[in-house]
Amino acid sequence: NFETKMNKIHELIKENKEDLFGGMKNLEIKIVENLNSIIQNSINEVSSLNNPIEHVLKKYFQEIVSSDSTINNIWIINSVTKINEEIKKIINNSKEEITIIIPNLENYLSIEQLKEITSNLTIKIASSEAHTNSLVKKFKNINNLTYKTLQNDDLILAKADNDQIVIGIKQDSKDILSNFIGIGSNFEPFITLLNPVLQSIWEHAYTDTFYAAQKAKTKISTIIPSDLQDKKEATKIKKIPKKISEKQNVSPPPLNGQIKDLKKKLQEKIDFLSAVHPKTGDNAAVLIDTALNNLIQKISNLKGNEISKELQNIADLILEKKGFSVTLHKIRITINKYKNKSTLLDENDKKDIFQEIETWKQKLF
């Protein structure tokens, strides 16, 4: 019986072999079709996930392009080479007046740059070199050029008429492509905003040869107008990570951080500014004034007891040059006030000392 059944099954398989293979083939086709449909739908769904990202990037790109007009008249200067190029442009393009404030002449200006200027162009230059310097004498031989001495280690400021200004600070960096932090602008309201800074620095430089030589030890000081501090900051724009359209490198540098850094470094250099100066020719007063100004410049880095020692040396100088006075007694009171203080002074203490120094100068000079 078993053998009969197996033979019967075998015969049935032989009879239906072609139909069975055809059914299996149809099943295979249907499975493949269904799989293709599932895969295609999955691809479309994954692809649609990119739509929000593409939308955001397109909107961001449009914002960058529309912001071009707001940053065209302010640009970043990152190297000394670039600032020298900007100074050269200012000299070539000025028609009425140039003002240049630099640490030294040799590294930033040459006589040849000024030889071809027009006769009606006024030039004002301030640098750390004394009037007795041989290079300074050559510059002073140029018509319409006014030279002043101003101790300045790293500030660079140049202005052409009321059309262009560059300002910044040289950095201690070995990278020649990133050894300067500054900005340039041909935006007239911005230039007008910086004019008081430029004017204040220029007024506190010195034309008198002897007095300038004495003052060369005093660092540059000025006051940033409150208007400059209250100005609304520029919108920070980040660089777009990849090309979205045919335009390339349209993303501008982040001005906000650069301007903040520049403002901070300028503020570090302009703590106190003395408005009291000795009369020309009063050598004793000049020595006392220089000593007091040197103390003002170092005051942020000195502890209270160190300031007392500095003041004691100045008191000895005043006693030697001017003799005993009520002012000398007041100086000794200040010496005693800080001689036991072994920490740095806070801002209020520094302002108090500065005001006292101004009062002492008025009495002594």
Image (cartoon, grey):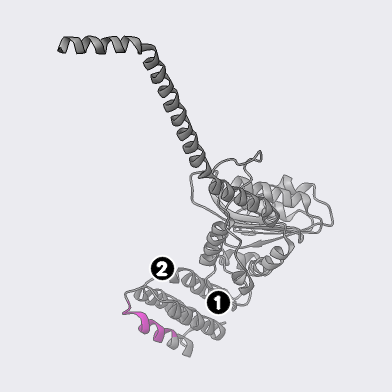
Q: Residues within 10 Å of mark 2 (few under 14, many from 20)?
A: few
- At label 1, which amino acid type do we have? Ala
Q: Residue furthest front?
A: 1
Report the side of 143 relative to 27 (left or right). Answer: right
Identify the secondary structure beneath mark 2. helix
Q: Position of residue 13 (x, y in %)?
A: 30, 12
Q: For marks 2 and 1, give the CA distance.
A: 25 Å
Taking depth in this image into account, of 227 and 288 the one nearest to the observer is: 227
Residue 288 visible in the current orientation: yes
Q: Which quarter of the rendered picture does the N terminus lie within?
A: top left
Q: Residue furthest bottom?
A: 326
**Relative vertical location of residue 134 with respect to residue 281 in this rendering, above or below:** above
| The label number, if any, that marks residue 301 in the structure image | 2
Dividing the picture into quarters, in which one does residue 126 lie?
A: bottom right
Q: Position of residue 303 (x, y in %)?
A: 36, 72
Q: Residues within 10 Å of mark 1 (few under 14, many from 20)?
A: many
Taking depth in this image into account, of 177 and 208 the one nearest to the observer is: 177
**Relative vertical location of residue 297 with respect to residue 3 in this rendering, above or below:** below
- At label 2, which amino acid type do we have? Asn
The kind of secondary structure the magenta stretch mainly shows is helix
Tell me if residue 243 is in the magenta stretch: no
Residue plotted at (41% across, 24% down): 27
Q: Position of residue 315 (x, y in %)?
A: 43, 79
| The label number, if any, that marks residue 285 in the structure image | 1
Taking depth in this image into account, of 267 and 150 the one nearest to the observer is: 267
Q: Earlier in the sequence, mark 2 or mark 1?
A: 1
Residue plotted at (31% across, 79% down): 340
Range covered by the magenta-colored residues: 331-341
Tell me if residue 338 is in the magenta stretch: yes
Instruction: Say whether marks 2 and 1 touch (CB < 8 Å).
Output: no
**Relative vertical location of residue 351 with respect to residue 85 in this rendering, above or below:** below
